[in-house]
Structure formats: C-alpha cells, structure tokens
Image (spheres, rainbow, N blue to C red):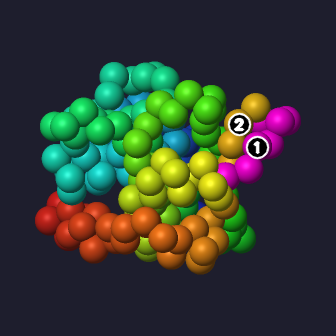
Amino acid sequence: MKLDLEKLSSSEVLRLFSETIEELGRRGLTRSKNNPVADYAEHLVCKAFSLRSAENSTKGYDAVDDDGKKYEIKARRHSAGSNPTRFSAIRDLESRHFDILVGVLFSQDFSVKRAAFIPFSVVRKLAFLQEHVNGWILPIRESTWTADGVTDVTLALKGVQAKES
C-alpha cells in the first residue's frame, strides 16, 4: 500500500506519523514514542534470540538472556542522503555494562541490511572516545562486521521480519 503523501497537508502527515508511532507501540514493535529505529531493532533481536527486554532507561544494556548475559543493542538506518558511519555513543564503556553489543543496520524501508553480535572485547578494541559527546563511538565499517569474534546474525533478524510481514 502506497499513500500519496503529497496530497496530504503538513498537519495531516504529522498526524499520520503520530498515529503510526502509536500503532507500532500497540503492536509491540516499539516501547517508546521516539524514533522507532532503536526500539524496532530491540524488538527484532529479543524475538530472534528469546531475550528479555530490560526496563526502559536501564543503564548500559537493553536485554538479557536466560544465563544473565547482557546485550546492548545499537541500530542505524540508511535513508536518502544518509549513509551512517557510526553507531550512537556508548556511555561509560569502562564499567562494562554489557557482554555483547548487537549492531543492526537497516535499509531505508526498515528491512534488516546487516546485523551482528559484537563481543565487549571487540567493541573495546574498535571504539574510540569522543569527548564532546561524552561517549565511545563504534564505527560502522566492514572491519567492524568482520572482526575476529563477531558473529553475523543478519539471517536470524530477517527471519523474524519475514514471520511478522
């Protein structure tokens, strides 16, 4: 279904956006009213690997497995004119709040383009401190996805998307 958004007024498009965010929450695909990229990535990762979501605003991780292993989930989305080169800042990396960082890269249409489990040791090695954002930055490069110890989980997330289509 393709809506002809050009025929809608600006206020109608904004209302549609608001209703879309509400509907994504009702369906359990998002947990907040923010940009849905992070919440949707968390939903897919938790479903694919039977993880439990951490409480909203839990410091340093987003999900936990049955063994108590903690997962930080970072996601970016390609869009027209935007080719993300890094994940959002990781705060207080030295405290090792997570065991695995799950990096998810979406295409513009929210289809999973690439996803991987990145162990803390790899994150620590590849991330760099950016003082003006008060956090560590993990670059999105081919070398990040293929580093020793990184596990590609793209197909698992695509499988969840296919089941939910």
Side of 58 where 84 appears, left or right? right
- Crowdedness of circle 1 by 10 Å Cα count: few (<14), some, many (20+)? some
Inter-mark Cα distance, 2 to 1: 6 Å
Q: Position of residue 48 (x, y in %)?
A: 21, 56
Q: Nearer the viewer, residue 119 or 74?
A: 119
Magenta span has 17? Answer: no
Q: Nearer the viewer, residue 27 or 117?
A: 117
The residue drawn where x is 62% and y is 65% is 140
- Check contact, mark 2 vs mark 1: CB within 8 A: yes
**Residue at the disc numbered 1:** 129
Residue type beneath disc 1:
Leu
Quarter holding the N terminus?
bottom left
Is residue 3 among what the camera can see? no
User: Which range of residues does the magenta coloring cover?
Assistant: 127-133
User: Is residue 134 depicted above or below 112 in this figure?
Assistant: above
The residue drawn where x is 30% and y is 52% is 45
The residue drawn where x is 51% and y is 33% is 96
**Which label number is shown at residue 135?**
2
Residue type beneath disc 2:
Gly
Is residue 91 among what the camera can see? yes
User: Is residue 110 depicted above or below 113 in this figure?
Assistant: above
- Crowdedness of circle 2 by 10 Å Cα count: few (<14), some, many (20+)? some
